[in-house]
Image (tube, rainbow, N blue to C red):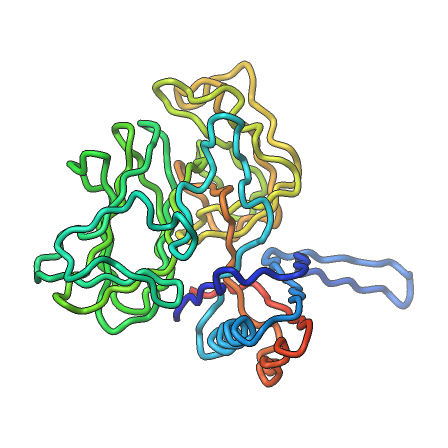
Amino acid sequence: MADILWPPGLVPKRVTWTLERNIATSRSPLSGTTQRWTRAGSKWRASIQMPPLNATESGLLSSFLDLISRGDNVGVVPVFQNDAAGVESGLAQFRSLNAPWADQPGLTGWTHQGLVSPPYLSGGNLVLRANTLTPTPEFRRTFSAVAGLPYFFSVYVPPQQYPAGFVIGNSAFTQVYFDNRPSPSVGVVSGVVTSNNTGLTIAFTSPVAFQPAVFGTFSLARCYIAQSAAAAGGSALVLNGSDPANQGPPNLVRTLKSGQFVMVRAAGRLELKRVVSAVDTITGVTIGSIGTAGLGDLRIEPALRGAVAASAEIVADQPLCRMRLAEPESTSTIDAPLFGGFAFDLIEEFGA
């Protein structure tokens, strides 16, 4: 299975998110009594309406729909809502810390070493070539961070002939928090890292000498974590947005509002959820030796499909959903956007 990223820069005219719940009803012909059954497993449906597209944009959308209709491929679709979700004024704790490669200043602040030539862009992707067989970090940048707070990272590695990898460490790069050298066609790789000082350094590598290593998008942003574990089927979490040492900014949890989307790590998978009520700060208690300033009750829908472990990430920045075409046979009309508006439906993918 491959995760196919939504084409960067391609923005729908309208997206309607609805939940398809597993509900059945029956009515007795004798008594007239109605019975209703509700089972877990609600799926998100995204009804997407595109504006008129030019030839280039039409090709991007056509290719995306074609790829996610093949085999086990799925599309990684942004919610296109609350891109700066949870940004707290003056702190920017949850704002994405980087710009897309193709945007200016997407490459500002990055340095390279051990490369045949400076990195370049190809189709919006970053391409680098190492001049040594030693997989040293060739292209890196350090982002400001708050020591002890969790940060969510996401890297998209497009299909390619040779492996491409990346490493994340602190600002001095003396401790490696995540080291991954994925095989080709790895798709989206994500996780949580915590710095022990005031910086996080991301470094991209090209382990095969003189061969291109291609990277799609990269994102690094503050995230919340689950203060305690939650069982599958639950709709409530205790949210922690603070540092055990200093308890973080006051009322940090109040940044989430009803109707916003978040991603929750459940049973190893990121599930898309919607906040159904504003997060209320828990008062008068201390949970897990952490003060009340950073804790709150989070109510979500749909219910958790998998169990949530303590310290699992809850991501408010740039939420995504893994989806497939609701009607795969609609791929016969994927060139229609060239001539005007185009609409299609995607359904959430539950598979591995």
* Residue appearing at x 23%, y 47% in the figure: 111
Q: For this view, does 349 lie left or right of residue 31?
A: left
Q: Is residue 182 above or below residue 70?
A: above
66 and 90: which one is in front? 90
Q: For this view, does 125 lie left or right of residue 294?
A: left
**Residue lying furthest left in this view?**
133
Q: For this view, does 156 lie left or right of residue 325?
A: left
* Residue appearing at x 51%, y 32% in the figure: 238
Q: Quadrant of residue 19?
A: bottom right
Q: Quadrant of residue 116?
A: bottom left
152 and 203: which one is in front? 203
345 and 279: which one is in front? 345
236 and 63: which one is in front? 63
Estimate the x, y position of residue 325 in percent, counting from the top left.
Answer: 57, 72
Q: Is residue 58 above or below residue 232?
A: below
Q: For this view, does 158 lie left or right of residue 12?
A: left
| Quadrant, the N terminus | bottom left
Estimate the x, y position of residue 296 in percent, counting from the top left.
Answer: 54, 27
Estimate the x, y position of residue 343 in percent, counting from the top left.
Answer: 67, 71
Estimate the x, y position of residue 35 in percent, counting from the top left.
Answer: 79, 58
The number of callouts visible is 0
* Residue appearing at x 23%, y 36% in the figure: 170
| Quadrant, the C terminus | bottom left
* Residue appearing at x 12%, y 55% in the figure: 114
**Residue lying furthest top in this view?**
284
